[in-house]
Amino acid sequence: MVNFLIFGPPGSGKGTQSVKLAEKFNLVHLSTGDMLRAEIATGTDLGKRMSSIMSKGELVPDEVVIEMIACKIDHSKGSAGFLFDGFPRTVAQTIALEKMLNDRKMKIDSVLVLEVEHDELVKRLVARAELSGRPDDKDPAVIENRIDVYKSKTEPIINYCRERGIYQPVNGMGSIEDVFRRLSKYMKKYL
């Protein structure tokens, strides 16, 4: 099994690309946000625990998120691997994810980082706000803060992965199809 992490600042298109790549390469798309909502909606024991935590306004602890991912991995059969979208968000989470994967004789094979110019990110987010009505994509101050948070939180993960030899920058400029072709070309090396 091959495991990819995909990173990119808000507006880089990582969500759009993740869905397309997972489908093309028979990967399980692991979006932790989607997984959290699904666990809660289906009322699993894990979902009930997470709902209780979140109802108090607290963050779901890393070990609970790792447990949720491990459960998904353990119950996914017949795929070529996994594409992690939105997780990990810290170096500690990256280390915990690596340990959980190692326990299953798996590893993180590559970290794909979409690189997009700042002005293009803003343009994409504003366009997305017009299409989807997302209020967080309308306010320039909120957009700048989201990009700054991404840089401050993600930079250490990128450096950690660079040191481990699994970092792969990918040009995220151009059309959805252009970026998809670049990502696909790189991923084919592993699949």
Image: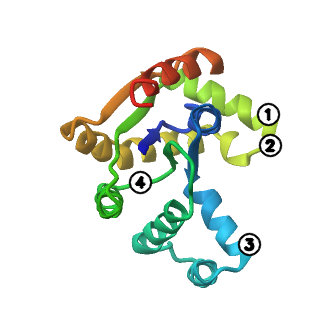
Residue type at numbered disc 3: Ala
The residue located at (64%, 39%) in the rendering is: 19
3 vs 4, front mark: 3
Mark sitting on residue 41: 3
Label at residue 47: none
Residue 101 % position (x, y): 35, 58
Task: Please give left or right for residue 187 compared with residue 142 in the image.
Answer: left
Tell me the colour scheme of the image: rainbow
Looking at the image, residue 13 sits to the left or right of residue 172; the answer is: right
Q: Residues within 10 Å of mark 2 (few under 14, many from 20)?
A: few
Residue indicated by mark 1: 130
Q: Which of marks 3 and 1 is nearer the N terminus?
A: 3
Q: SS class of the residue under badge 2?
A: loop
> The C terminus appears in which quarter of the rendering?
top left
**Mark 2 or 3, which is nearer the eye?**
3
**Amino acid type at mark 1:** Glu
- Which residue position is annotated with label 2? 133
| Residue 35 in sight here | yes
Q: Which residue lies furthest to the front in this view?
A: 78
Residue drawn at 69 percent across, 31 percent down: 126
Horizontal relation, residue 155 to residue 29: left or right: left
The amino acid type found where label 4 is placed reads: Arg
Residues at circles 3 and 4 in contact by the CB criterion of under 8 Å: no
Residue nearer the viewer, 184 or 81: 81
Image position of 183 (left or right of 34) = left
Q: Which of marks 2 and 4 is nearer the N terminus?
A: 4
Observer-side mark, 4 or 1, equals 4
**What residue is pinned by disc 4?**
89
State yes or no: discs 2 and 1 in contact (Cβ < 8 Å): yes
